[in-house]
């Protein structure tokens, strides 16, 4: 078995029924495939569990599978491993990183914390195990407001690494005493307000749905702001027929599947040839890589035990508070 460039690079014989083989191997090995909503449609369709970051963390903590194939990005697999160290956790392509997580190195984050004693540290789940180990409470876009709101108003907070989510929480909760890390997600930062307004002018009856990782001017024009799961829930329950969707394009697959009678229009980024906005990291995960990773049980996520124990505390605190 060859791991080349971060994934198992083995030839798959022509004519292999990949989906059938994945299902056969999954059963034989007691494996579960978990996928984030931003992965490509064919990956979402073979997953045993699809979710946003919070739901995936909750599922990773409770599954009784022996192997977790994490169809998502590296920090998600790492979170699963932190919560379930006895399991084999595999991310089919280790190149599936995250620009937001990369924007916050543990040593730099530690410097900010050390310069500001007495602050409670809240970190978005989109961080490395090293950052989580420095954190008091992890959060996701689903529960960030609830977690901040549950702390006494006078509590001083360091929030990292997403500045847009941090500023959104600050304005929703009315907190003054929040220090926010200056990081951002390359996907959500690049949406174009001008193009969204153009789309709205073309479709005045469409509602704008936006993820809180988007910049403030976009959140101000949105009809609804929420995490991936919250946007899906809104689209399911709301009675409009058209939506301009300002988040990663993978979400459109479930939106259209669940609401075939409604129209979902992807918002384009500033520079766009495809008209939608993809996370290049999430899109690295495909069926061939899942098949090979399941067959050869690689590449596995490993975490230093001392670091894992520290990081686990802050994730468990989030799970208790969610
Ligand atoms: P949620 O899954 O919390 O909506 O976060 C979106 C995201 O950017 C995942 O990487
Ligand atoms: Fe990271 Fe953004 Fe991709 Fe999510 S969408 S994995 S935050 S780069």
Image (tube, helix red, strand yellow):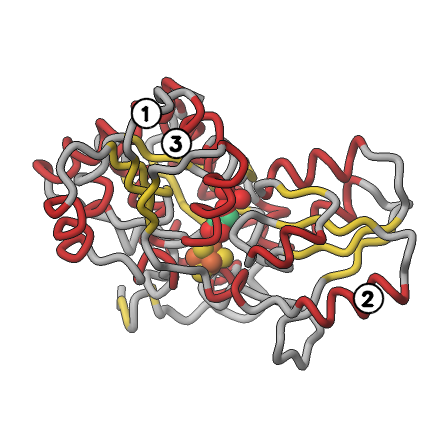
- Check contact, mark 1 vs mark 3: CB within 8 A: no
**Which residue bears the numbered disc 2?**
199
Q: Nearer the viewer, residue 19 or 223?
A: 223
Q: Residue at x 44, y 38 (%)?
A: 140
Q: Nearer the viewer, residue 191 or 127?
A: 191
**Which residue bears the numbered disc 1?**
154
Visible residue check, residue 75:
yes
Q: Residue at x 17, y 57 (%)?
A: 108
Give neighbour class at mark 1: few <14, some 14-19, many 20+ (Cα, 10 Å): few
Residue 111 disc label: none
- Check contact, mark 3 vs mark 2: CB within 8 A: no
Determine the secondary structure under disc 2.
helix
* Whole-number angstrom distance, CA of label 1 to CA of label 3: 34 Å
Q: Quadrant of residue 303?
A: top left
Give neighbour class at mark 3: few <14, some 14-19, many 20+ (Cα, 10 Å): many
Residue 60 disc label: 3
Q: Quadrant of residue 198?
A: bottom right
Give neighbour class at mark 2: few <14, some 14-19, many 20+ (Cα, 10 Å): some
Name the spot of residue 299 as percent of width and height, x first: 28, 56
Q: Residue at x 45, y 64 (%)?
A: 281
Q: Is residue 118 left or right of residue 89?
A: left
């Amino acid at each position: 078995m060859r791991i080349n460039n971060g994934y198992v690079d083995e030839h798959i014989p022509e004519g292999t029924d990949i989906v059938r083989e994945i299902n056969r191997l999954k059963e034989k090995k007691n494996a579960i495939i978990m996928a984030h909503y931003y992965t490509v449609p064919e990956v979402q369709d073979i997953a045993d569990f699809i979710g946003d970051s919070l739901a995936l963390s909750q599922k990773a903590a409770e599954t009784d599978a022996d192997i977790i194939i994490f169809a998502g990005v590296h920090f998600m697999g790492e979170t699963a491993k932190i919560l379930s160290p006895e399991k084999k956790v595999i991310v089919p392509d280790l190149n599936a990183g995250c620009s937001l997580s990369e924007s916050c190195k543990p040593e730099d984050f530690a410097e900010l914390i050390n310069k500001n004693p007495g602050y409670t540290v809240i970190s978005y789940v989109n961080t490395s195990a090293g950052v989580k180990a420095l954190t008091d409470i992890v959060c996701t876009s689903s529960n960030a407001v609830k977690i901040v709101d549950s702390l006494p108003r006078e509590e001083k907070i360091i929030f990292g690494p997403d500045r847009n989510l941090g500023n959104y929480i600050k304005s929703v909760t009315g907190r003054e005493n929040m220090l926010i890390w200056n990081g951002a997600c390359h996907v959500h930062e690049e949406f174009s307000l001008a193009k969204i307004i153009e789309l709205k002018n073309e479709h005045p009856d469409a509602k704008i749905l936006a993820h809180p990782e988007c910049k403030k001017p976009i959140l101000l024009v949105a009809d609804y702001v929420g995490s991936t799961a919250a946007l899906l829930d809104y689209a399911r329950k709301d009675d409009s027929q058209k939506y301009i969707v300002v988040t990663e394009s993978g979400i459109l697959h479930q939106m259209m599947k669940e609401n075939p009678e409604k129209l979902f229009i992807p918002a384009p980024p500033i520079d766009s040839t495809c008209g939608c906005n993809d996370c290049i990291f999430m899109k690295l995960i495909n069926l061939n890589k899942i098949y090979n990773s399941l067959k050869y049980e690689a590449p596995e996520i490993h975490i230093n035990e001392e670091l894992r124990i520290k990081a686990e505390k802050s994730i468990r605190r989030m799970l208790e508070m969610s």
